[in-house]
């Protein structure tokens, strides 16, 4: 399964690169697939590339759903172990 993760743009660098924060972890990514990216915007990141811009609300909602999915997966593993 492929997964794109919401990240906040912290620094826009030359040569179509940017530094983003993903749950507090900073990562340097390519923004070459987007027309323009600004500090403070949220983007979906997959394998080091920003694929799409999204609102802060969309990013928060996606991260919350991802967190719920992780919790459900862990609960499923616990249920299966008993």
Image (cartoon, rainbow, N blue to C red):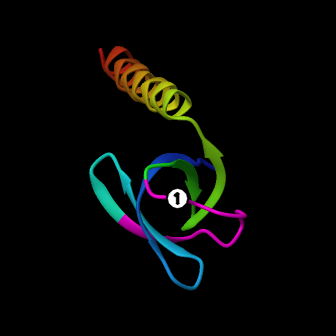
**Residue in front for this viewpoint, 15 or 48:** 15
Is residue 38 inside the magenta stretch? yes
Q: Secondary structure at mark 1?
A: loop
Q: Is residue 57 above or below residue 53?
A: above
**What is the x, y in percent for residue 51?**
67, 56
Give the overall secondary structure of the magenta segment: loop
Is residue 15 inside the magenta stretch? no
Quarter of the figure with the C terminus: top left
**What is the x, y in percent for residue 48?**
54, 68
**Residue in front for this viewpoint, 77 or 44:** 44
**Residue in front for this viewpoint, 53 or 23:** 53
Side of 34 relative to 62 (left or right): right
Query: Is residue 41 at least partly visible in the picture?
Result: yes
Q: Which residue has dot 1 on it?
A: 38
Query: Which residues lie in the magenta part?
Result: 27-39
Q: Is residue 72 above or below residue 58?
A: above
* Picture residue at 45% right of the left edge, 29% below the top: 60
Side of 25 relative to 36 (left or right): left
């Amino acid at each position: 399964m492929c997964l794109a993760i919401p990240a906040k743009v912290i620094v826009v660098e030359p040569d179509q690169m940017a530094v983003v924060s993903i749950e507090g972890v900073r990562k340097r990514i390519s923004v070459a697939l987007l027309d323009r990216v600004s500090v403070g915007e949220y983007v979906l990141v997959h394998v080091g590339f920003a694929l799409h811009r999204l609102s802060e609300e969309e990013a928060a909602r996606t991260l919350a759903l991802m967190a719920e999915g992780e919790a459900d997966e862990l609960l499923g593993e616990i249920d299966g172990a008993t």
